[in-house]
Amino acid sequence: MDKLLIQGGVPLSGDVAISGAKNAALPILCACLLTSEPLQLTNVPHLNDIATMLRLIGQMGVEVTMDGNDGLILDSRGLNNPLAPYEMVKTMRASILVLGALVARCGEARVSLPGGCAIGARPVDQHIKGLQAMGAEVGVEHGYVHAKASRLKGARIVTDMVTVTGTENLMMAAVLADGETVIENAAREPEVVDLANCLTAMGAHIVGAGTDLIVIQGVERLHGATHAIMPDRIETGTYLCAAAATGGSVRLTQTSASYLDAVIDKLREAGCEIACTPNEIALKAPARLKAVSVRTEPYPAFPTDMQAQFMAINSVADGTALIRETIFENRFMHAVELIRLGANIKLDGNNAVVTGVPRLDGATVMATDLRASASLVIAGLIAQGETLIERIYHLDRGYERIEEKLARLGASVRRVR
Ligand code: EPZ
């Protein structure tokens, strides 16, 4: 299994381009199930999770054609198998995103119930509750969610908590429903807006995406469209943290600061100089960061997908930071690995107290989930000596060509067996 070997201590510098967003591309790939006409996508990142989703919709009868370096043409005219098998869903929870679109288009879907994952139990009860409110018969049989509806009906849905893929699934179900659907307490994440923009280009009627109240007028059918996937704000935030923690100076291109206010505010509070233009973010780090406390909450507050990276940068900052994780119940797995590199971290339930130390020392560590692996990469770039990160398949799920991009910024990173 691949590992990543990092020789730390090099301040990152130079330019690097950000890829399309994994968490926008995944639901948008599922949107192709809603029409029998081709959906043409650009800025699609090359990631393991994207490849898994393409295999999943491919086995349902969708024709997938590569179009240039980062493009895809998805044609679901031949959609004939509304089934998401366990073997595929177990490798990627986001497979649940096919559920709403399949019931809306085919009147039926069988989707393996995603199990828990490293960061939490992550149930999908809100996805099911919303579909039932729209008149679907939904049952769980032999580990599969089985949903049926001759045609979904518009409904008023209030989700018990803010759920990103829940909002996306119900939005995709509602665009072909009979009547008006209102989603209250909806997720406001930029990826929800990017999906809504793609669906609108396909002929859907959606108002309020990006707010906590989304109103969808169902239509008889959707048509084909062309859509460019938004830049990945979490990949952007990860590179900003890597530059900040190594005392570097970088410019990120093909991205946008408008989705990252909470993260950029915190990096400025830590002492970074940050300049933003419409598609670029430049960061110049101070000699030593100041410790900054963060509390994860749904967008537009500080994202849980940046929590691990901030634990890494606080591990060498001046002072003590409190990190509070309010979204997932088990998202501190990276802390024990950072401690192996010499960090001073005290865990107490969903709180972590990080007291900055003058330096980290390279060691062998293990990645446990996608963002935990990103925090270990940052720590490895900071640490004196060599750091070997095991199980980097987690990293490949969400970071495109990471060692190539880091090498472009002057880092000494290579993949080893
Ligand atoms: C999305 O996951 C992202 N994944 C996650 O990114 C991200 O961490 C998360 O949103 C929060 O921002 C994708 O977009 C593919 P939620 P999602 O439903 O939609 C509970 C990454 O690193 N909940 O918003 O699965 C749930 O357990 C990944 O790229 C229910 O209880 O997250 C959690 O505690 C990791 N019942 C909270 O709500 C439900 O039916 C928020 O989860 C749904 C959710």
Image: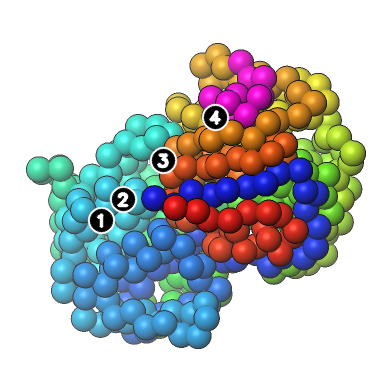
Q: Nearer the viewer, residue 323 or 182?
A: 323
1 and 3 marks in contact (CB < 8 Å): no
Residue drawn at the location 54% of the way across and 49% of the way down: 4
The residue identified by callout 2 is 91
Separation of marks 3 and 2 at Cα, in angstroms: 29 Å
Separation of marks 1 and 2 at Cα, in angstroms: 6 Å
Does residue 337 belong to the magenta stretch? yes
Looking at the image, is mark 1 or mark 4 nearer the viewer? 4
The residue identified by callout 4 is 337
Residue 413 seen in this snapshot: yes
Q: Mark 4 or mark 3, which is nearer the start of the sequence? A: 3
Mark 3 Cα-neighbour bin, 10 Å: few <14, some 14–19, many ≥20: some
Mark 2 Cα-neighbour bin, 10 Å: few <14, some 14–19, many ≥20: some
Residue drawn at the location 70% of the way across and 30% of the way down: 360
Does residue 320 belong to the magenta stretch? no
For mark 3, give the secondary structure: strand
Identify residue type, mark 4. Glu
1 and 4 marks in contact (CB < 8 Å): no
Q: At which x and y percent is residue 107? A: 18, 64
Looking at the image, is mark 3 or mark 4 nearer the viewer? 4
Residue 27 seen in this snapshot: no
Q: Mark 2 or mark 4, which is nearer the start of the sequence? A: 2
Q: At which x and y percent is residue 297? A: 59, 35
Q: At which x and y percent is residue 12? A: 78, 53
The residue identified by callout 3 is 158
> Which numbered marker is on residue 88?
1
1 and 2 marks in contact (CB < 8 Å): yes
Location of residue 17 by image quarter: bottom right
Specify the segment rendered in magenta: 336-346
Separation of marks 3 and 4 at Cα, in angstroms: 39 Å
Identify residue type, mark 2. Thr
